[in-house]
Each structure stands twice: as structure tokens, then as C-alpha cells.
Image (cartoon, rainbow, N blue to C red):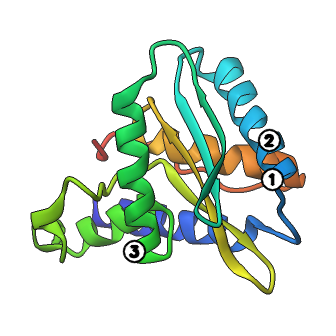
Amino acid sequence: MADDYREVIEIIRQQEEKLVFDAFSQDDSLKLGLKIIETVLDQYKKGVSVRIDLNGITVFSHLMGRAGLGNEWWMRKKMNACQKYGTSSFRAYLEIEYAGKLEEYPWAANQGNYALRGGCFPIQVKGEGTIGYAMVSGLPQANDHQLIADSIAALQGKAIPTVLGGMEFIP
């Protein structure tokens, strides 16, 4: 299992390094949000909640199927974790879990505001760093994560490794 965690963490690092934009606007948020919806309809056939925030403002939001308030709540908590660690929320989860410190993470007493779960991916721009976050809620956490990564990769015309496959060890 330890090797699996290391391998998945490395895949996520590669995704984060590769999926950097030259520029990203509110119009690009619409393209990304629609790509996420298109991908989920094509591959998962299930409703999810999608949100994209840029510079602290929600610029895209859509609830599919039965997605609702609970999904919104999860996305906010995932984004808080992503902001705190400066990585995708799934990578933060795996790094803390792999270190055996999930129960000790600094804000464990304040879990109402943070969630170490997959489903929030930083939107990074060359020369600017993280300017926003793409979030999904409604699928298993590895799928939430990969859905965003695959959608960004499709918009950029890039091939990326996947965290899916052999992920049974991750709840």
C-alpha cells in the first residue's frame, strides 16, 4: 500500500506541474466548467456539482442531477484544504494519510471548514501562481480529482497520467 500512495502522489505532482495555464480568464472558466460537465456526462453518467473560483469570486457554478447543498459544502471545505496546502486537495489528503498523520493534522479540531478529500484542483498560471480553484463533488474522491485534471488536460491538448486504476485502497 505504501508504494501505491507514493505512486499516486507522484502522479498528482506530475499533473499539477503539467497543467499550468499561460493565461486564464473568466471566459476560460466557462470553457473548463463546460468541459467538466461534458466529461462527466460522457464518462460517468452521474450528476455532480461543479464550481470554479477565480481570485476569490465564483465565476462558474453548476449542479447536475441530484447534486445540492451537501456537494456545495464539500467543495468549500476541499477548496479550503487546497488553499492551505497549496496543492490539490487529493494530494494533500494522500501526503498526510501516507505520513500517518491524518488524525493529527493541524486543523483537525476545525473539520467543519476543511476536507482532505479529492475534488479541488488549483488553477495555476505561469508567472502568477495559483489564481483560482476548480472543484467537483459527487463522485468517489479519486474520480472527482481525475475528472478535473482530465478536463484541464483536454482544454490544453495535453496527455497526463491518471490516478484511477488500482485505487481500491483509497476510500
Q: Quadrant of the C terminus?
A: top left
User: Disc 3 to disc 1, how far (Cα)?
Assistant: 23 Å
Task: Return the disc, 2 or 3, that comes first in the chain's sequence.
Answer: 2
Residue occupying the point 33% across, 39% down = 168
Q: Is residue 162 left or right of residue 84?
A: right
Indicate the quadrant where residue 95 lies. bottom left
- Secondary element type, mark 3: helix
The amino acid type found where label 3 is placed reads: Lys
Find residue 60 and report its horizontal and vertical position in percent. 68, 41
Q: Is residue 117 left or right of residue 41?
A: left
Query: In this figure, what is the number of numbered marks?
Result: 3
Marker disc for residue 84: 3
Find residue 15 and report its horizontal and vertical position in percent. 65, 64
Find residue 46 and report its horizontal and vertical position in percent. 54, 16
Q: Is residue 62 above or below residue 31?
A: above
- Which residue is tagged 1? 26
**Other residues around mark 2 within 10 Å, as few (<14) / some (14–19) / many (≥20):** some
User: Disc 1 to disc 2, how far (Cα)?
Assistant: 7 Å
